[in-house]
Image: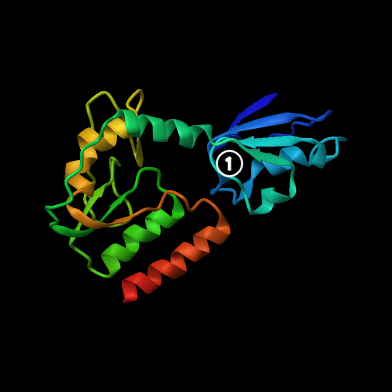
Amino acid sequence: MIELHGPTYKYHGETLEKPEIIWINDHCYNEEDQCFHVERLLESGPCDPSLHTLVFDHIGHDDALSKYNSVCFPIFLATECKEFIEQNIVTDWSKKTHIFNFSCNKPRIHRRLLLEEIKRLNLTQYKHSLPWLVNNVNDIPVTDYKFGPETAMAQGIKNGNFKNAETYDKLLKKTVFEPSCISIITEPCYYYRSFNEFINRAHLIFEI
């Protein structure tokens, strides 16, 4: 079995000589190169690409990878769900002070566009999490919600051993999510088709 870390893997001329099971951690669309590097790997070498099996730990694919033999084994999502249940989160949605919220960690294209649209439309009634050292998109302020040991990056943050459920419960629940009526979720849009749908819908929402 071959294991790949989707967000960082890039094809560098490797060849697959025999049918392989390829386990892919996390999403595997490279936004900088606008391609799936794993597809280049599948098409390399003398082996028929259809003989390989891709195993995704997040979601199934209905994009360029759908033509290959694949299995969706959403262990990451199942683990996240289990961790949120075990966190025993108690919410209070009774004190709404802002219209919407958003969180931007990694600076993906659609997230940068969201920042641009919020500023262009002069929207102000929001809560947000923007754990960048510097916002080079506009003057929306960066935030500093962290326990302490996290590693701050130019545009992002490495949470280390802190789980998403703990980060939500102890850092973001009361400061970002509970005070807002609407949460704008930008996480799912990795793929070109989904990206276009997101932009079209976003414009409709903002124009309304």
Q: Nearer the viewer, residue 64 or 90?
A: 90
Q: Position of residue 36 (x, y in %)?
A: 64, 45
Q: Give left or right: position of 65 versus 112.
A: right
Residue drawn at (69%, 34%) of the image: 12
Q: Residue furthest bottom?
A: 208
Relative to 164, say whether 161 is above or below: above
Q: Position of residue 39 (x, y in %)?
A: 70, 43
**Residue 186 showing in the rendered view:** yes
Q: Residues within 10 Å of mark 1 (few under 14, many from 20)?
A: many
Q: Residue furthest right?
A: 46
Residue drawn at (39%, 60%) of the image: 113
Q: Which three-letter amino acid code belongs to the residue tagged 1?
A: Cys
On-image quarter of the N terminus: top right
Q: Give left or right: position of 16 versus 136.
A: right
User: Could you say which quadrant of the image residue 81 lies in?
Assistant: top left
Q: Nearer the viewer, residue 155 or 198?
A: 198
Callout 1: SS = loop
**Residue 145 showing in the rendered view:** no
Residue assigned mark 1: 28
